Each structure stands twice: as C-alpha cells, then as structure tokens.
Amino acid sequence: MYQSETEMMVQGIDVEKVRNDFPLLTRTVYGKPLVYFDNAATSQKPTAVLDALEDYYRLYNSNVHRGVHSLSQEATEAYEGARKKVATFINAKKAEEIIFTRGTTESINLVAASFAKKFLKEGDVVLISAMEHHSNIVPWQMVCAEKGATLQVIAMNEFGELLMDDFARKLTCNVKIVSVTYVSNSLGTINPVGEIIRQAHEKNIPVLVDAAQAVVHLPIDVQALDADFLAFSGHKIYGPTGLGILYGKEEWLNALPPYQGGGEMIKTVSFEKTTYNELPYKFEAGTPDVAGAIGLGAAIDYVEQLGRDNVFSAEDELLAYAMRALQAVKGLRIVGPLSNRVGSISFLLENFHPFDVGEILDKQGIAVRTGHHCTQPVMDFFNIPGTVRASLAFYNTKAEIDKLVAGLEKARMLLG
C-alpha cells in the first residue's frame, strides 16, 4: 500500500486549522468520518460564507436597487460590493462587465441565445471542443438548429488533450464564435485557452471560456487572457449554489441583445416601446439572488485571506500525492492526462462498474462522483460507461487520500 505523509502543513496552508472553518467536514457517514472528494461537483462552504448568508436574511433582507429605505440601501451596497469583488478577483476592467446569473449553465445559455439572435445565420459555424460539459454543448446545438448553423468540434487525443492542429484547420472564416472549457471537469485537462484566444482573435473571432473548474484551481485574469466572455459558478469556489458569473467585455455586452425581459433590465416601458437599461442590469431581469451574491463575495474574501497562491500550491501538492498514490493501486487506470492537469482525477478500477466502486467507497464514508459527469461524448470517445472521479480541494488531506487508496483496495477485493 502507498505510504502516507502525515504532516498537516501543505504549502503554507494549515490544513487542520482551515478544516475547522468548514462545519460539514466534521460529520460522519455510516459511522465513519466523512472524506469529501466530490469538490468538482460542489465545494463545501466555510463559516464565513454561512454567516454572510445568515446575516443578510436576519439583519437586512431586502430587495436591491431603487429602494429608498435603509435595508434596501444596505442590501444594494453589499450586492454591488460583491460584484466589485468578483471584478477584482478575475481582473475585469470594470465591475459593469460582471453579470450575475444562476450559474455557468445560464451564463453560457445567455451568450449562446443573445449572440445567435444577432450574429448567427445559416451556414455559420460554432466551434467547441471534444471535452465540453453538456452545458457548453446543448445551448449551441439549440441555437445552431434554430439558425441553420453548424456545430464543429475540436478533436482530442487518447490522453485527453486537444489537438491544436485540428483547431487551426477548423478555425475558418465561417466560425463566428469559439466556446471552450479552460479545465475539463471529467478529465482534469488544462486546455491552452490563451493560445486558442490568440489564434481566434487573429481572425476577429470571439471566444467564450467555461471557467467553472478553472476558477477554483488557477489564477484567472480575463484581461491577460483577452477572453471575450468567461463563465463560472459560485458554488465551485466555496460560495452558495444558484449564483453564477458571466464576464463579458463591455463592447460585446453592449452589442448583444438582452437575454430575458422584465424588471431591472429596462430604463423605460410603454405599451409601444421599451428601452433597455445600461450594463450590467441589461442582463439581470427580475429580483436577483442577493444572498447568493453576498455569499460569493464572502467566499472570495475567504480565499483571498488564505492567499490564492497558498491555496493553489496546496492543491498542486495534494494532486501530485494523489496521482502517485492512485497509480500504485493494482488494476487502476487513470482516464485523462498524467500531467498538465488540476483538480479532478477520473479512473476505472479493473473492469468493475464505476457505480459499484463508488457505492463501496460511500459505505466507508468516502464521497466520490461516478458516471459520465455530464460529458457523455468524452465517455463515448474512450468507449467506457463512465468513471469514478475524485476531486480535490485545499481542505483535503494526504491521510484522506490514503483512505481512498485503502477503500479502493477493499472495493477490488469485494468486487473481485
């Protein structure tokens, strides 16, 4: 069995101390201490985020904007303050370039629907990659079917890496937008999005980046990337569920028509004509998730207080340890690249079904994700039904990785 390193200091993070910030990590499952390796699906929330949510609902619950009373002004200040925190976190030029949505899925749907309405026509091409989450496939399929456009796919190799020569061949003048994931949720691959953006911009083609998995593991600088659009979800980065971010360059957001109609996204309304609001409110119809935005702001504060470099370094160290440990397990096959990766490790154990392996791990208190991970085309490419996915966060420990290894050994014995 792989031998554990037991120290609790990981690259500047006092793991024992930070674990105390996450109440859910103290619970048991089937009488065993919880080992939570499903962070790619959703991360756990620190007390600072839980307190921020409770404070909003207990102390100043009110709708934002236009209210003259004190509670509304307090809520508006906190809500817009969270927008500014997000803008700083990803280095947007302006807070107005940050749109609050319900998640990465809605952010991508917003761009697909609004972009297609104005810029997509019959014969045009939308270019995505072979490793996209369903939320970066289906919206584009829908608008392509509506407009008579074609969806093309950048191929990948057997290591789960994009073929950049295939990208260059398919990046023709018919391509109107490229939409790619920064980090694969099912393979952990880090894609060369900077180079993809550079090549696309040489032909004046905009690029949307799905950063749902990247934002929690990599520093995001939208100006350095030169991304036209970038999307992520708050719950991936220790914030609440139901709150997402769409970043868009100001010129692009101004060029796109609104996604939904209703309150807040208007300046004036008559039965004859409506004029739309300025950014970012043009894309924020209706009452927003005020608490969610405030919670995300608290999550960003928490990560910044720990130090992003410390968090990323801790995760890199854990990932390296986990890769070594899992590769020592007899009959285990890692699906995806062995390097240039972050976060998630997808694998198969012998010829056992992933669900069976995951169920045995669950009985030992170990939470992993099993299935196709909303990337069925990826599983079809590898000709497999799905994988077991263990995804890491900085609050995980090397001792927990050892428990995973022991759990897999037990699963192999029981299933074999």
Image (cartoon, grey):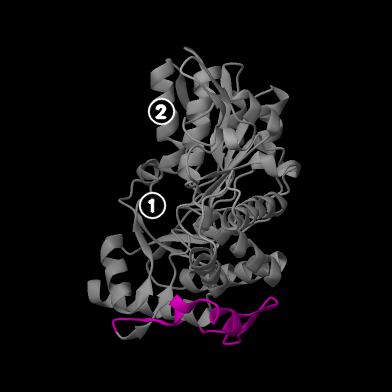
Q: Quadrant of the C terminus?
A: bottom left
Residue 249 pos. (x, y %):
68, 34
Residue shown at 67% from the left, 38% from the top: 227
Give the vertical position of 330 relative to 151 (above or below).
Answer: below
Q: Quadrant of residue 350?
A: bottom left
Is disc 1 surrounded by few (<14), some (14 to 19) or many (20+) residues within 10 Å?
many
Residue shown at 34% from the left, 46% from the top: 383
Q: Quadrant of residue 137?
A: top left
83 within the magenta span: no
Q: Which residue is mark 1?
A: 373
Residue at the top extreme?
Answer: 122
Q: Which mark is residue 223?
A: none
Residue 264 pos. (x, y %):
54, 37
Boundaries of the magenta span: 1-30
Amino acid bearing label 2: Gln
Residue shown at 65% from the left, 27% from the top: 254
Q: Is residue 107 left or right of residue 333?
A: right
